[in-house]
Image (cartoon, helix red, strand yellow):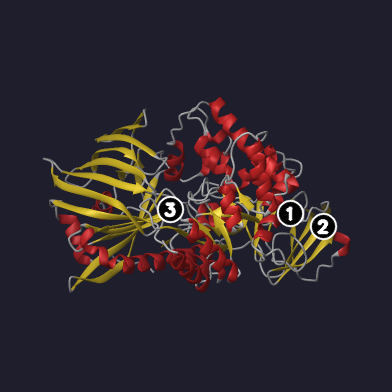
Amino acid sequence: MALALPSVGTAQAATRALAPDSATILVSLLARPVGTETYVVRDAGRGSRLTAAVRLVDRGTPLSLDATLDVGPDLAPTRFSAKGRSYRFVNVETDVVLAGDSAVARDRGITAKIRPIGATYVAQGWPPLSARALLVRYWERHRRPPSIRLLPGPDTHAARIDYRGTDTVQVGGRATSLRRYAVDGVVWGRETVWLDEQDRFAAIVTRIHILPMEGVRADLAAVLPELQRSAIADRVDDMRRVARDVSPTASGDFAVQGVRVIDGTGRPPVSDATILVRNGRISQVGERADVDIPGGMRVVDGRGKTAIPGLWDMHAHASQVEWAPAYLAAGVTTIRDMGGEEPFLRAFRTALADGAGVGPRVLLAGLVDGDDSAAFGAVTAATPAEGRAVVERFRATGYDQVKLYSMLRPEVVGAIVARAHDLGMRVTGHVPRSLGIRPAIDAGMDEVAHMPVSGDTASRVVRDVIAALAAHPVVVDPTIPWNELLGRAPTTPIERFEPGIRGAPPALAANYRSVANPTDSAGASEALRRQLAVIRAMHDAGIPIVAGTDGAVPGHSLLRSLELFVQAGFTPMEAIQSASLVAARAMGMEGDSGTLEVGKRADFVVLDADPLDDIANVRRTRWVVRDGRMFDPGALWRAAGWTP
């Protein structure tokens, strides 16, 4: 149902010029306060100027960004400039000048002349937060156009805004009405923005790169949790809309006939096979002659195609609803989220489990860090008792694992591991700085995220660490696509190794293209080669290796992980198993998932070519089946804001 804008707010937006304004916005990352944005709006002759200063500290790393935005009497932008960092690896250096029907945009040293058509605004990632109020007011002033071109990005970069309702909150004993909007496109996906009764910026729920971020005007800080609940409800409604709009190609009881089946067990493929799906499970799978298809059952022609088990991403950060269709489009049917904001993740997981959304199954590893100024996230533990309490709370709210972070002290780690094991939970995560890899193994960590060892595999030190990992044994998710992406030389186009970036939403692609790594292509290649050699050595030692991405290019980077594992020396079958059977086994779910066998969940991917011939064929997805519902990946990519 369409919602009409409040008549008072519309009238004010249409007739009132910008009033002088200034405020401090309190900024949080994973619900942890990380700094501020201060802004001032003042008269600038024929228009107004917004000046904003962002000062954040993320895990001990300072992030500083300064921006100005000039707008005319009709709130149309005339100049925008921003310089600094909007995330630890995202560099911003932008200047856009608009005059008449043309614009000159300078972005990280590249100058382009643009002739924007229709409604046009300026944005470069999330900052400044305060500018979102001006964007919404521009939208209102200009009769709410269906889309607004955003500079300095490509002509496909556009914002779409919806009025979603009014939240009435109590501030200082007074009822205050805040208008709520969904803004799609400034960052990847939808963010929620609130304006107050005077059209001032009130609050925002958005993302810093792929991690959840909030900004709230200091005088409204007490009502932020209430606003967040409202934003989550809107996002779940968005998931329901996607579920209505993206219809499955087949569902219920159906058969895929004539397909080549790689079941993921390691057994040889079965050519000309039939997969029978009933009630979300694999009812039968085998050679065509051995499987009877009941009369009247829907039959999908799988000739010339290859089926593999549904894939797992064991290091996800799904901080927004758009991750759900993006993952499924890439053939990822299960993810393990490795740290986000609990209220959103629980709602996200529930919506997907109940069929209110379309996406993968969600498993949760609860993030906990030490009580330190450089900690990550709002959940911390300073003492063993606090560590045990955190584990118990995670268990009570349905988390599957505990994820350790860097600033935990040794005695707290020991308490967390012991309590988690008592409750049947496994412990994964970063190796705390206070321990190092060998003491972390001795403390009982079951899994380790990222690369637990680096260096020359001929080194005795490296060999000894690998032997210790194998003896425990510890599961490793090396997040190698993330390392490759952030470690690339600026002269190396991302498309050279990750073609999925071509279809990425402009705001997301801009983040990765802005990474300035001080290395050349030879240095980047050598760094990657050494990491792959370590992965190969761990694999050869019998250490379970699982595929994970830590975000990177959504969906696509999980497929890149398999390609990189083959480069490291895995067979294509072993690479597929790293994202299926080995992952399911690590989560204790191999009896229900991880292979394409009778009785297991009907989670599988149908490809247009055989990945055992060339592992890159995992990118050639024709259909993906999740819990017995078959989807076309193109529709899913579009639902996530991508160009298929």
Establish if 597 lies above or below 270.
below
Dot 2 or dot 1: first in sequence order is 2
- Residue displayed at 13% across by 46% down: 42
List the residue tagged with mark 2.
273
In the image, taking residue 340 as reference, residue 191 lies left or right, namely: left
Cα–Cα gap, marks 3 and 1: 33 Å
Cα–Cα gap, marks 2 and 3: 42 Å
Establish if 69 lies above or below 176.
above
In the rendering, at what x and y percent does residue 176 appear?
21, 69
User: Callout 3: helix, strand or loop?
Assistant: strand
List the residue tagged with mark 1.
307
Quarter of the image that includes the N terminus:
bottom left
Give 501 or 524, whichever is nearer the viewer: 524
Label 3 crowd (10 A; few <14 / some 14-19 / many >=20): some
The answer, for residue 636, to whether it is visible in the render is no
Cα–Cα gap, marks 2 and 1: 10 Å
The answer, for residue 27, to whether it is visible in the render is yes
In the rendering, at what x and y percent does residue 12 appear?
17, 59
List the residue tagged with mark 3.
211
2 and 1 marks in contact (CB < 8 Å)? yes
In the figure, residue 232 lies in which quadrant?
bottom left
Dot 2 or dot 3: first in sequence order is 3
- Residue displayed at 45% across by 66% down: 236
Give 474 or 504, whichever is nearer the viewer: 474
